[in-house]
């Protein structure tokens, strides 16, 4: 117990060491969570759009894939 | 070369006909610098200490202020497309526009700088160094700024964005511009600082026009 | 070029599906080991005391800030010069991660500076350069999102990344020079390569962990960018058809 509180005190500099690690963890986790949320949102939209395209016929889906390949090559 | 001269003369003529643009930039320069005594107090020693920095920072901001119009009018009325498809290289037109911009918004700042040096109690030994440093530094700012101005063409809030992009890149010019003046005031040789400013100018001259041309081609695609 | 094998988005997606779990596990393992070694095992510095432990996040974050900017510039070059379809996406995806690492470096630098130098911020050459780098990241991201046409934003930002990358050494050099001119006498410096192994190992482990974290999040973000590009293409087709 005493060892733990000594560890947390960091020789009297705990007020600087722990916020530094906390801020780093907060930023790293924040970037990760934001990236995951964005990925999930885009993939859901893409799935919805692709499903709509299938209903309208496979030809359009193929056209979309070609357009995407074209757009990818151009940019 | 003919294309270069044609664009240069056209830009100068347009600016003179509209008038006022250069005057507004100089007015901003003088006004912004005279705000500092109100901020820090009129104490002459303090003003003399910060004069070189204040003049350089306000000169930097004035150049930025004028820059967002560098390609904007030509982009809006379509003459940029004409320049890009003309047989003469676009690079020549970019160089001409940069030179015109410096003559219209850089040289007036150098001319007005002695007035500010007087207002801000800059020691007299510092004045030649200030003028030399501004002469070498402001073209670099225009060249680097031209790249930014070409990049933000068609962007939302282009003017503010331009400052955000270019100001960090202007840090070296600011550092050595101020250092030259401070060295002169302290009685040290100014030559090394002016040489660095010259080197920065040459480096900008060798690279920035190409980057600006590439950015312009992107903008009109 | 081996890189071109991943040029095709479909192939990239397959690669990322395989690599992502490995990168994630490696990131967690390296950071966990680095934390244990850095916080518990490694000794306190004889001069700086326990505050030296801030180094194990601060210094790797500074490395990452530079490395991510290099990746961004590399992606931009490959997009502009070789029209590599993934170059733009990688550069675009890397920017927020790099800005995050730069922010970590600045915040931990302030928290380290207060006990060591007695001030939250000093115009130390390294801190100042990192601050300018942070502004470059912000400008890059602002330019990317400033256009109604996303491709125009991508291209303009790619050019800016290259211009910025060329300027970073010049800025670093001039800030170093400026700082030696105005050097405050009290600034303590880290011992350079003579750092002891008990400190070097956790430092390198944290660096490796951050690199794997970057790789994993980069894959996630590039996947999101690919999806976004497909959505754009599908919407275009839907509008035309």
Image (cartoon, coloured by chain):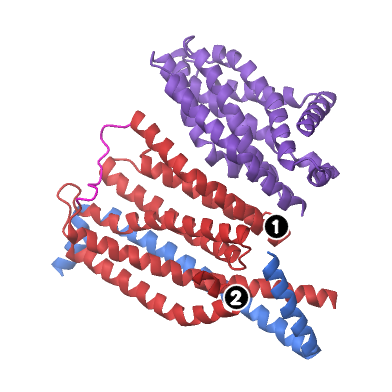
- Residue shown at the point (50%, 79%) measured from the top left: C15
Instruction: Give the x, y percent position of residue B29.
Output: 63, 24
SS under mark 2? loop
Of badges 2 and 1, nearer the viewer stands 2
Q: Is residue B171 left or right of residue B13?
A: left
Residue B141, x across and y down, in percent: 59, 33
| Residue numbers of the magenta segment | C182-194
Is residue B181 on the magenta stretch?
no
Q: Chain of mark 1?
A: C
Using a 10 Å C-alpha cutoff, classify the residue at mark 1 as few (fewer than 14 neighbours), some (14 to 19) or many (20 or more). Answer: many
Please tell me in which quadrant of the rendered image residue C60 appears.
bottom left
- The residue beneath circle 1 is C152
**Residue sticking out furthest to the top:** B124
Q: Chain of mark 2?
A: C
Q: Which numbered marker is on residue C138?
A: none
Chain drawn red, letter?
C
Q: Secondary structure at mark 1?
A: helix
Residue that appears at 71% across and 84% down: A50
**In the foreground, C62 or B49:** C62
Residue located at (25% from left, 63% from top): C202
Q: Which mark is residue C8?
A: 2
> In the picture, which chain is purple?
B
Q: Check the image and report above or below for C124 versus B127.
A: below
Left or right: residue A15 compared with residue B166: left
Chain coloured blue in the rendered structure = A
Q: Is residue C208 visible?
A: yes
B107 w.r.t. A56: above or below: above
Query: In terms of depth relative to the viewer, which is nearer, B84 or B22?
Result: B84
């Amino acid at each position: 117990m005493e060892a733990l509180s000594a560890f947390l005190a960091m020789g009297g500099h705990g007020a600087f060491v722990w916020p530094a690690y906390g801020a780093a963890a907060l930023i790293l986790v924040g970037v990760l969570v934001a990236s995951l949320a964005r990925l999930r949102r885009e993939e859901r939209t893409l799935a919805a759009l692709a499903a709509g395209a299938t209903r309208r016929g496979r030809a359009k889906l193929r056209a979309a894939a070609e357009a995407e390949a074209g757009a990818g090559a151009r940019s | 070369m003919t294309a270069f001269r044609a664009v240069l003369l056209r830009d100068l003529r347009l600016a003179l006909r509209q008038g006022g643009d250069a005057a507004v930039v100089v007015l901003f320069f003088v006004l912004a610098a005279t705000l500092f005594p109100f901020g820090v107090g009129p104490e002459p020693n303090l003003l003399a200490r910060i004069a070189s920095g204040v003049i350089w920072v306000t000169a930097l901001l004035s150049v930025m202020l004028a820059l967002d119009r560098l390609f904007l009018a030509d982009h809006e009325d379509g003459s940029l497309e004409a320049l890009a498809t003309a047989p003469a290289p676009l690079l020549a037109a970019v160089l001409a526009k940069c030179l015109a911009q410096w003559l219209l918004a850089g040289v007036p700042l150098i001319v007005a700088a002695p007035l500010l040096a007087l207002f801000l109690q800059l020691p007299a030994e510092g004045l030649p160094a200030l003028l030399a440093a501004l002469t070498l530094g402001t073209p670099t700012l225009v060249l680097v700024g031209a790249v930014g101005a070409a990049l933000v063409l068609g962007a939302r809030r282009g003017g503010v964005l331009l400052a955000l992009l270019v100001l960090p890149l202007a840090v070296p010019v600011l550092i050595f511009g101020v250092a030259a003046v401070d060295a002169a005031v302290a009685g040290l040789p100014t030559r090394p600082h002016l040489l660095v400013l010259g080197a920065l100018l040459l480096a900008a001259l060798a690279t920035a026009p190409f980057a600006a041309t590439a950015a312009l081609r992107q903008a009109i695609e | 070029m081996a890189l071109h094998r991943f040029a095709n988005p479909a192939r990239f997606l397959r690669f990322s599906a395989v690599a992502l779990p490995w990168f994630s596990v490696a990131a967690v393992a390296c950071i966990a080991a680095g934390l244990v070694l850095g916080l518990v095992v490694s000794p306190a510095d004889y001069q700086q005391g326990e505050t030296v432990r801030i180094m194990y996040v601060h210094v790797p974050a500074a490395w990452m800030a530079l490395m991510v900017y290099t990746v961004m510039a590399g992606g931009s070059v490959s997009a502009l010069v070789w029209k590599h379809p993934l170059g733009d996406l990688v550069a675009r995806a890397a920017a927020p991660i790099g800005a995050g690492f730069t922010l970590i470096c600045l915040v931990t630098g302030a928290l380290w500076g207060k006990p060591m130098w007695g001030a939250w911020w000093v115009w130390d050459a390294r801190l100042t350069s990192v601050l300018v780098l942070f502004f470059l990241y912000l400008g890059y991201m602002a330019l990317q999102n400033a256009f109604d046409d996303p491709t125009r934003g991508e291209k303009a930002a790619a050019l800016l990344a290259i211009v910025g990358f060329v300027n970073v050494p010049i800025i670093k050099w001039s800030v170093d020079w400026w700082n030696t001119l105005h050097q405050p006498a009290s600034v303590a410096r880290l011992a350079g390569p003579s750092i002891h192994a008990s400190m070097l190992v956790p430092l390198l482990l944290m660096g490796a962990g951050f690199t794997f974290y970057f790789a994993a999040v980069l894959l996630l973000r590039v996947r999101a960018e690919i999806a976004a590009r497909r959505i754009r293409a599908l919407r275009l087709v839907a509008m035309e058809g």
